[in-house]
Every structure is written in C-alpha cells, then in structure tokens.
Image (cartoon, helix red, strand yellow):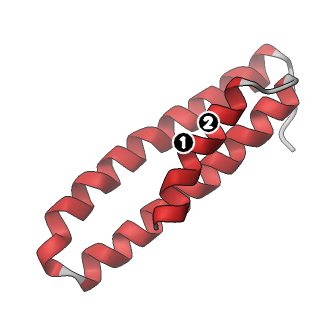
Amino acid sequence: MARAGTSIGANIHEATYAESPDDFIHKMSIALKECYETEYWLSIMSATCPELNQEAEDLKREAGSMRRMLIASISTVKARFNISKQ
C-alpha cells in the first residue's frame, strides 16, 4: 500500500513537468491507477483489521477525492487539446 500510495504523488509531481499534453495524461493516468490500487489495499485493511477500520475508511474517502480530481484533470486536458480516449 505504501508503494501505491506514494506513487500517486510522485506521478502527479512528474506530470507537472510533462513534455506534452499526451505525456501529462500518461503520468496522471498512472497516478489514477495507483489511486485505485491504494483504495483496494485500504479496503483489504479495513476488512481484515477491525481496529484500523475508522482510519482506513477516512483514508479511503481521501483517496476517493483524489481519484475524482485525477479523473477531472485528465478529462480537462483531453477536452482542451481535443485528445481522444486511448
């Protein structure tokens, strides 16, 4: 979970320095995949460690917010540069 969770931020940071809109979308899409993976691991943690359930649920909500922001960012760039889905 630590690898997926920290990869989100690393890929968003890399996207800041993207060489093109396609490169930005690629890096943000990787961040999005890592966000989905983090949500998965948080669900597992919540189900298997009842004592961490509240913390896991709080983190899942934050990850969900981040996921929605990533999707919106990717969609905005695709629309702005008229890039079709890949």
Q: Amino acid at mark 2?
A: Ile
On residue 60, the disc is: none
Number of residues whose C-alpha sits closer than 10 Å to that of mark 2, classed few (under 14), some (14–19) or many (20 or more) = some
Image spot of residue 76 (x, y percent): 67, 21
Q: How many marks?
A: 2
Would you place residue 56 above or below residue 23 in this image? below
Residue at coordinates 26% horizontally, 73% vertically from top-left?
Answer: 46
- Image location of residue 24, percent across then percent down: 77, 30
Q: Is residue 25 left or right of residue 56?
A: right
Taking the image as shown, residue 54 lies to the left or right of residue 47, namely: left
For residue 48, above or below residue 1: below
Residue 27 in the image: state x and y as whole percent: 74, 40
The residue tagged with tag 2: helix, strand or loop?
Answer: helix
Q: Disc 1 designates what residue?
A: 9
**CA separation in Å, label 2 and label 1:** 5 Å
Q: Is residue 59 above or below residue 49?
A: above
- Please give the name of the residue rendered at 48% of the width and 56% of the height, measured from the top-left corner: 5
Residue 51 falls in image quadrant: bottom left
Q: Considering depth in this image, is 73 or 8 the residue closer to the camera?
A: 8
Which residue lies under the disc numbered 2? 12
Task: Please rate how many residues cluster around mark 1, counting C-alpha atoms within 10 Å: few if below 14, some from 14 to 19, many from 20.
Answer: some
Which residue is pictured at 40% across the width and 47% down the height? 64
Is 47 on the left-hand or right-hand side of 75?
A: left
Label 1 element class: helix
- The amino acid on which the numbered mark 1 sits, given as a three-letter code, is Gly
Residue drawn at point x = 62 percent, y = 33 percent: 13
Q: Position of residue 83 (x, y in %)?
A: 87, 27
Q: Are marks 2 and 1 in contact (CB under 8 Å)?
A: yes
Q: Quadrant of the C terminus?
A: top right
